Amino acid sequence: MKQLILLLTLCIPGLLSAQEDAKYLAGAVPEKDGKVVFTQELNAPSLSTDEIYERMLDWATSYFKEENNRVVYSDKAKGDIAAVGQTMLVFQSTALSLDRSEMNYRLTMECDGSTCLMQVASIRYTYNVSYQREPEKYIAEEWITDKYCLNKKKNKLNRGNGKFRRKTIDYIDELFASASTALGV
């Protein structure tokens, strides 16, 4: 009986991590015309286009207020808003080491009717490696897509760039959730 409990104790973490990784496997990073583009459509049938635009502009102005983050374009007549963002993706943080990468991206929002179409694109990474003078630079299309980030069977993330894919997806999910909350949907 003790051996069975020990065996289950050793196997359960492996099963849980396999289920956890399913969110990040094939198809998790959407591509449009060869470019990585994360898309979210927010529907607010009870709001007018102007109300949606105003709420999204207020959200973007407050969300992109830190250094190197800003709203770069807004046109109420067209219902368009664009912002550039920069964030740090922290992969591991301990007392002795900090593994992180800077991620830059562009967010566009198109408010039309009772919807707001959000798109995150132009994702770039700057990764400082301790043993190199210059940081490594990557673009999402050559770093986190299925072609570059998954093994041949497409059932496991690669060790080196898998952390970028995981953290990017989590960050984009948080970004879209924040906007959805601001819109009240």
Image (cartoon, rainbow, N blue to C red):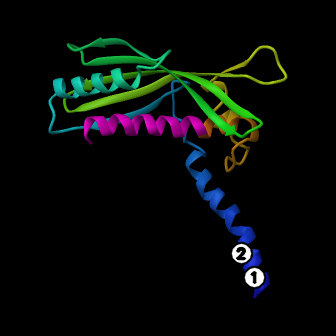
Identify the residue under disc 1. 4
The answer to if 169 sits in the magenta stretch is yes
Disc 2 residue type? Answer: Leu
Say which mark, if any, is on residue 92. Answer: none
- Rendered location of residue 29, percent (x, y): 55, 36
Q: Is residue 127 toward the left or the right of residue 132 in the image?
A: left
Q: Is residue 21 toward the left or the right of residue 171 in the image?
A: right
- Rendered location of residue 42, percent (x, y): 30, 36
Q: For mark 2, give the secondary structure.
A: helix
- Where, quadrant-wise, is the C terminus in this rendering? top left
Q: Give the range drawn in magenta.
A: 167-185
Q: For mark 1, give the secondary structure.
A: helix
Disc 1 residue type? Answer: Leu
- Where, quadrant-wise, is the N terminus in this rendering? bottom right
Identify the residue under disc 2. 8
* Image position of 134 with respect to 101: above or below: above
